[in-house]
Image (cartoon, grey):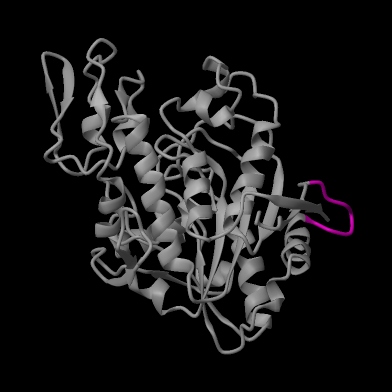
Amino acid sequence: MEAKPAKVYFSTFRTTLNENLLMKLRRLITTAGIKNIDFADKYVAIKIHFGEPGNLAYLRPNYAKVVADVIKEAGGKPFLTDCNTLYVGGRKNALDHIDTAYTNGFTPFSTGCHVIIADGIKGLDESYVPVPDGEYVKEAKIGRAIMDADILISLTHFKAHEGTGFGGAIKNIGMGCGSRAGKMEMHSSGKPSVNQEKCVGCGMCIRNCAHDAITITDKKASINHTKCVGCGRCIGACPKDAVHPGSDHSNDILNKKMAEYTAAVLRGRPHFHISLVMDVSPFCDCHAENDSPIVPDVGMFASFDPVALDQACADAVNRQPVLAGSYLDEKPHTHGDHFCDIHPTTNWKSQIEHCEKLGLGTARYELIQI
């Protein structure tokens, strides 16, 4: 029997003299039913990306405060959370990660709740969560504080991504909640390589590699796959598009592992999901820079179903015109899909399909505009 369409609630970014964007977000998530969750005396993890230092595309902390306030009003105990990264940057350990969160405005004073880095100081504080029906993952490694929470709320900046096609709720939860070892497990299938003809030996890939996997010989970079963990940071760092993922197949495996990690995080407890489709950059917020948006801002989405939510956001982006002068504008438009035009070796649909297979939700949705 075909799954019943999930309800996805949507609001544009248009405002009135009587309702600003923060008020509209509150109305959106309330209408979508967030208050139907029993928050009383429950610990609530709000999974968010705090933004890499230098990147300005991440969500403003004002939006996080709206979500935290609604939870507190319902008697819950919210905290903002993320896990440490595999690569160099401002979020590779909990102390730097909290500094980054505070620098980007995510403080207890601005959001009304604390920041907890879920996998501890060095990314080693993890819970082992069984995924009995996992095709690739049988035991996910999830940041302990996330698994200690009673309820999971995802607050996602929806954008394109060089490894997974796009970064939506599934990536925010699956990849974002993985500990350092969990992230390594998810990335391990696809090791990038260098197109020697395009490489100019600038060294940007080396500066973005945390694992000493890249060397330059005769002004050409090469990647040692024994040392490489497959995080993909070098792909977005290369100014000449000389670094490319291993294959379409490996990116599909990455997406499926990410879906299985999402299952580990969500099963057995209440969850709710919010995505803001704005500043839709061509690469992840993990970069220390953000390119200009590829499409106009779309709006805010909310649902109990993360699969339907991601599908709705992807469809909304693909309906938008390409912004002149953007990274997408420079690419051949041959796929009929903005995400595949930007990153041709990716297939975002594989994460959706695998989540459906795992019973995490449905790609079929009813869009309800408020």
- Does 302 lie within the magenta span? no
Residue 7 vs 235, above or below: the answer is: below
Residue 81 vs 341, above or below: the answer is: below
Asked whether residue 176 appears in the rendered view, the answer is no
Residue 348 vs 128, above or below: the answer is: above
Question: Which residue is located at x 33 percent, y 71 percent?
Answer: 129
Asked whether residue 106 appears in the rendered view, the answer is yes
Residue 296 relative to residue 231: left or right:
right
Q: Which residue lies furthest to the right in this view?
A: 17
Residue 41 vs 306, above or below: the answer is: below
Where residue 248 sits, quadrant-wise, is top left
Magenta stretch mostly in which secondary structure?
A: loop
- In this view, the residue in front, 95 or 141, is 141
Q: Residue furthest bottom?
A: 41
Q: Position of residue 254 (x, y in %)?
A: 36, 44
Circle count: 0
Q: Where is residue 5 in the image (x, y as percent from the top left)?
A: 71, 55
| Region of the chain picked out in magenta, as a range | 14-20
Question: Which residue is located at x 38 percent, y 62 percent?
Answer: 133
Residue 152 relative to residue 239: left or right:
right
**Which quadrant would the N terminus be assigned to in this image?**
bottom right
- Does 15 lie within the magenta span? yes
**Which quadrant would the C terminus be assigned to in this image?**
bottom right
Residue 11 relative to residue 337: left or right:
right
Question: Which residue is located at x 31 percent, y 20 percent?
Answer: 242
Question: Which residue is located at x 41 percent, y 27 percent?
Answer: 345
Where residue 239 sits, quadrant-wise, is top left
Q: Where is residue 113 in the image (x, y as percent from the top left)?
A: 53, 74
Q: Position of residue 124 (x, y in %)?
A: 23, 67
- In this view, the residue in front, 17 or 138, is 138
